[in-house]
């Protein structure tokens, strides 16, 4: 499957998390506020902006999220916190962390290209409520989701 987004990638300097995104009662950060901050820092020539943080993320209606994205928008953010084995009291596993980060990054970027959750467990767009879901879902876009991403990539580059 073609899981690559075929885009030039650059690493930008870090931006500080907005202080108002921290929810002290939960000891977590509201991902939606982080996305809002990211939108003020999108380079003019960027098609998408993916932020990666080690902070634990949440939204008001969920205990935690692995990431969040603007559906059909520009920005997405992914958290390493619950992708790390150490979060579950296990020894670090860098290859597993990188695979989880890859899947979550593709998943959230898929949302920015207009994709919703896919019913196919083989697709990277399948919903993940737990880290086990992240591990067991596919690592690529299914053919239907890949078609949408490819179509929207061409449309966005022209626009």
Image (spheres, rainbow, N blue to C red):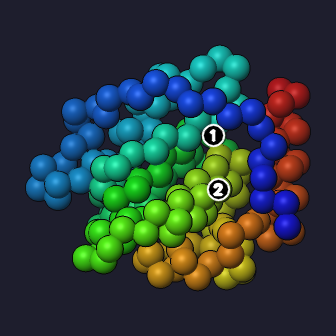
- In percent of the image, x 53 and y 65: which residue is there? 95
Q: Can residue 10 be seen from the camera position used here?
A: yes
Q: Is residue 10 above or below residue 103?
A: above
Task: Give the residue at the far top of this rendering.
Answer: 44
Q: Is residue 53 above or below residue 140?
A: above
Label 2 sits on residue? 106
Image position of 45 (left or right of 19): right
Query: How packed is label 2: few (under 14 Cα within 10 Å), some, or many (20 or more)?
Result: many
Label 1 sits on residue? 73
Identify the image quadrant of the C terminus.
top right
For this rendering, which residue is in front, 99 or 25? Answer: 99
* Residue 35 point in image, percent of width and height: 45, 38
Q: Can residue 104 be seen from the camera position used here?
A: no
Image position of 54 (left or right of 77): left
Disc 2 on helix, strand or loop?
helix
- In percent of the image, x 68 and y 69: which residue is there? 139
Query: How packed is label 1: few (under 14 Cα within 10 Å), some, or many (20 or more)?
Result: some
* Residue 128 point in image, percent of width and height: 51, 73
* Residue 113 point in image, percent of width and height: 71, 48
Q: Which label's residue is closer to the chain start, 2 or 1?
A: 1
Choose mark 2 or mark 1, whichever is in front.
2
Image position of 156 (left or right of 119): right
- In percent of the image, x 78 and y 59: which residue is there? 3
- Give the CA separation, mark 2 to mark 1: 14 Å
Q: Which mark is residue 119?
A: none
- In percent of the image, x 31 and y 50: which residue is there? 55
For this rendering, which residue is in front, 19 or 84? Answer: 84
Disc 1 on helix, strand or loop?
loop
* Residue 117 point in image, percent of width and height: 63, 68
């Amino acid at each position: 499957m073609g899981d690559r987004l075929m885009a030039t990638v650059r690493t930008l300097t870090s931006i500080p998390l907005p202080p108002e995104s921290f929810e002290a009662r939960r000891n977590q950060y509201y991902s939606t506020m982080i996305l809002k901050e990211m939108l003020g820092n999108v380079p003019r020539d960027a098609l998408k902006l993916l932020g990666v943080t080690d902070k634990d993320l949440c939204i008001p209606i969920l205990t935690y999220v692995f990431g969040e994205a603007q559906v059909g928008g520009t920005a997405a953010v992914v958290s390493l916190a619950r992708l790390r084995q150490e979060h579950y009291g296990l020894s670090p596993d860098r290859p597993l962390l990188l695979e989880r980060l890859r899947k979550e990054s593709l998943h959230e970027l898929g949302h920015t290209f207009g994709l919703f959750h896919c019913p196919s467990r083989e697709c990277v767009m399948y919903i993940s409520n737990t880290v086990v879901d992240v591990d067991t879902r596919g690592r690529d876009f299914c053919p239907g989701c890949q078609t949408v991403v490819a179509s929207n990539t061409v449309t966005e580059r022209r626009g």
